[in-house]
Image (cartoon, helix red, strand yellow):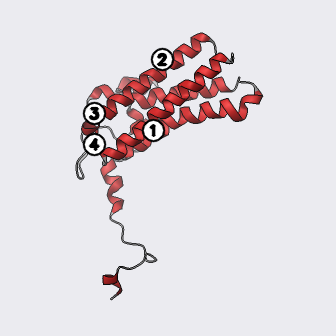
């Protein structure tokens, strides 16, 4: 299955929706938590998504891909800890806490699978491989979840975007001894 955008990944969708749910819940946290727990849980939950996006763009380099997925996994674990504090402080109901912990458990599991199977996600040379459909949101799911507007963007293939790497050297860059002659 050819996918042009990280927003079609199930793990990204779940992370995004969970981060938005945390944002809404954080509005009800006490004002004295504004610069501590509220800020930290929002930042870590959003970082899960941003690191998935970065990993997607770095699929050409397996080590970079795995590194960004690992960062995302770490941010998801941090979010779980913040959820535990929010429960213990009485800012979340046990049911909401259990639901969000379950979401982040699934997110961490999917990220681990992607890291373990990184070779099938990353291409060699200029090639990017196609992935099994199980990792991606189907057309019917895409229509249901319009909160992530991936369908409005012009899908540009990663290979075409990365063709910018053939830039000429900057004019102010130091010359090598051979070029100086």
Q: CA distance from mark 2 to mark 1?
A: 19 Å
Q: CA distance from mark 2 to mark 4?
A: 28 Å
Q: Which quadrant of the figure contains the C terminus?
A: bottom left
The residue under label 2 is 102
Q: Position of residue 64 (x, y in %)?
A: 36, 46
Q: CA distance from mark 3 to mark 4?
A: 9 Å
- Disc 4 is placed on an element classified as loop
Q: Closer to the camera: disc 4 or disc 1?
A: 1
Q: Is residue 40 left or right of residue 62?
A: right
Q: Position of residue 81 (x, y in %)?
A: 56, 25
Q: Is residue 100 left or right of residue 89?
A: left
The residue under label 4 is 122
Toward the right, the furthest residue is: 32
The residue under label 3 is 117
Q: CA distance from mark 1 to mark 3?
A: 16 Å
Image marks 3 and 4: residues in contact by CB distance under 8 Å: no
Crowd class of label 3 (few under 14; some 14 to 19; many from 20; radius 10 Å): few
Q: Closer to the camera: disc 2 or disc 1?
A: 1
For the residue pair 140 and 63, the one nearer the viewer reads as: 63
The residue under label 1 is 71
For the residue pair 21 and 48, the one nearer the viewer reads as: 48
For image coordinates 29% across by 37% down, the residue present is: 118
Which image quadrant for residue 36? top right
């Amino acid at each position: 299955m050819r996918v042009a955008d990280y927003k079609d990944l199930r793990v990204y969708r779940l992370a995004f929706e969970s981060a938005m749910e945390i944002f809404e819940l954080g509005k009800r946290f006490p004002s004295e938590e504004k610069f501590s727990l509220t800020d930290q849980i929002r930042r870590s939950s959003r970082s899960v998504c941003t690191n998935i996006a970065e990993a997607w763009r770095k699929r050409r380099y397996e080590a970079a891909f795995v590194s960004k997925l690992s960062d995302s996994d770490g941010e998801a674990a941090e979010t779980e800890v913040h959820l535990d504090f929010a429960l213990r402080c009485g800012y979340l109901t046990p049911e909401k806490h259990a639901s969000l912990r379950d979401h982040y458990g699934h997110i961490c599991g999917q990220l681990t699978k992607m890291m373990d199977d990184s070779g099938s996600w990353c291409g060699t040379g200029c090639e990017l491989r196609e992935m099994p459909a199980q990792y991606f949101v189907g057309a019917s799911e895409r229509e249901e979840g319009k909160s992530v507007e991936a369908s409005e963007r012009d899908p540009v293939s990663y290979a075409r975007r990365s063709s910018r790497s053939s830039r000429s050297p900057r004019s102010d860059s130091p010359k090598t001894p051979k070029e100086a002659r």
